[in-house]
Amino acid sequence: MAMDTFPCSSKRPCPSSSQDQNNARVVQGLDHVEQVLHKFLCLDDDDSTSSSPSSSSPCSSISLDLSLEKLLESSASDADRTVLIDRALRMGSMLLDAAKHSSRKRASKHNSLAWPLPPDLTIKVFSMLETQSLCYASATCSLFNKCAKDPLCYANLDLTSRVPKINNSVVSTMIQRAGNALRSLKLGVIPGATPSPGSCQPLVYTNRNSIVEVSNFSWNDKRSRQGRESSILTRSCLSPLSRDGGAPGALLRKLYLYNIERMDNASLGQALSACPSLLDLEIVGLHVELRQTLMSVSANCHLIERLFFESSKTGRDDSLKTQTCRELVDNCPHLTSLSLRGFKLHDYKVHVLVKGFQKLKYVDFSTSYSITGSFLRSLGNCMGGNLLEVLILRDCMHLKEVEVARFLTAILAGDFKLLLRLDISNKEGLASEGDWYHRCFNSSIMPVKQVLEARPDIDLVAEYPAEGSYIDSFDTDMNSEISLPSQLSSHTSDRSIFLSTSESSYNSDQGSGNEDGQDASYVIYEESSDEIDFLSL
């Protein structure tokens, strides 16, 4: 009987022999250094087949120690041993760095495959982040770091902080990364949360004091003076805007500067000269003059639409000239929002500004000195100020009760139809007609209730202390800084006349028709020759 024949099957290769073949093929393509490194890294794998459970791995810590000791013992001299140890340390450090680099590279490749967004959309997302969040994201991985280097990510820089921790070098680096893509720059120290529009919360901060008198804010006294100085911005912090032919500042639209104490008129003027496309300028707490700043804006920022300027020394800056106001009106016709807070402003200068800007909608003269409110007479109907939506005269020291009453009466008569917000509050009360020292806390001539009933769309804020004396609460040191008003040449004995004044009489000019120079109700203070010339027009 014939025997059954079975097909001869090939012998299955041994796993160890297959692995050896693979290693051999790998080694063939490597140079000498790579072969040595490959053999060293495969020591543990070569020993994985050891049958003795007690045998230690050749690349274990004990085995390496023993091997290194034997190698050192075989050296001829102590100097040779020292050289071997130094080489071992250096090679170990280099191998560790190379391994970390390869690990990051592999992780970056993995992230690039796992991250769902393409680079252009990633850059778009990063451009919406705050500057600090962007820096955190760029440190996450190589993929994010590469995307975060795109200039579009730095188009809107916010380098503000509650304590000084940004220096010129950081500002320069960020502006350099943005290049000509820079559109917005916020810089400086803000002692607290940014107040809402219309708020009179002061944003002025000084780093000369170890403790700042702002709620929930204090300076870290443990920091050394050297540490503080290294985080203080100097007058040259904005100089990068002028580099590369002014490319970084050429398309800048928004510039916010807060409490940069070392900034001066010349440095700010140079920065503004590099920003011809500026639309929004906000300055708080800088030791610069109002007049010089407005001259720089007038000369360089013809497209500006919003100007916010808060004085670092309330009531002490009396530098503004009438000619400067006129030049600003002529050269910046697109201005819609004007805030000059804490300056010494006279009514006829305010009149030139408010009446001159034909597109003006937002006005804020909070905490300003010398404003009596008589400039309001020349507004309304076809006389300017028709587009006003917000008017804030909060805590204006010289604001008169009678002028506020006149303005409210004009609203009742049908003027200022677009007005949505009016703030005439004063923590020290309004000034009386004839005596500036006498403060009015509960006015009976101001038709506040009638206005609220007739114009429910207006947010009218009229907050006054229930009782008290302005003189008792006023700081005597400030009296030397303020020019007190003289007695009016004419005094109205019957206040009810103002409530019965017709719309035409409210808007009409007295005397020869020059409301600036010959209106008897304009209080005359100690004036410069520039102001006297204006009065004689």
Image (cartoon, helix red, strand yellow):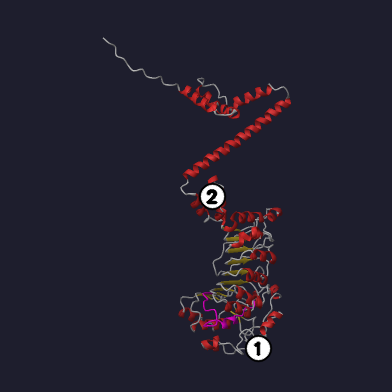
Residue closest to the eye, 444 or 250: 250
Residue 323, image x, y percentages: 66, 77
Q: Residue at x 29, y 11 (%)?
A: 3
Question: At 68% from the left edge and 68% from the top edge, which residue is drawn?
Answer: 288
Figure quadrant of the C terminus = bottom right
Q: Residues within 10 Å of mark 1 (few under 14, many from 20)?
A: few
Distance CA(mark 2)–CA(mark 1): 70 Å
Taking 354 as reference, is 266 above or below it? above
Q: Which mark is on residue 147?
A: 2
Magenta stretch bounds: 369-390
Name the residue rendered at 52%, 79% in the picture: 386
Q: Is residue 460 left or right of residue 513?
A: left
Which amino acid type is shown beneath numbered disc 1? Ser
User: Foreground residue, 83 or 310?
Assistant: 83
In this rendering, the answer to whether 272 lies above or below 75 is below
- Which residue sits furthest top? 1
**The one of 438 and 265 positioned closer to us in this rendering:** 265
Position in image of residue 453 (x %, y %)? 46, 79
SS category of the residue bearing label 1: loop
Answer whether residue 189 is visible to the viewer in this image. Answer: no
Q: Would you name the residue on which mark 1 appears? A: 489
- Of badges 2 and 1, nearer the viewer stands 2
Q: Position of residue 478 (x, y in %)?
A: 69, 73
Is residue 291 visible in this depiction of the protein? yes
Name the residue located 41 percent from the left edge and 21 percent from the top edge. Answer: 12
Residue flagged by tag 2: what amino acid is it? Answer: Cys
Q: Is residue 232 above or below residue 310?
A: above
Asked if residue 314 lies in the magenta stretch, the reply is no
Residue sitting farthest toward the left: 1
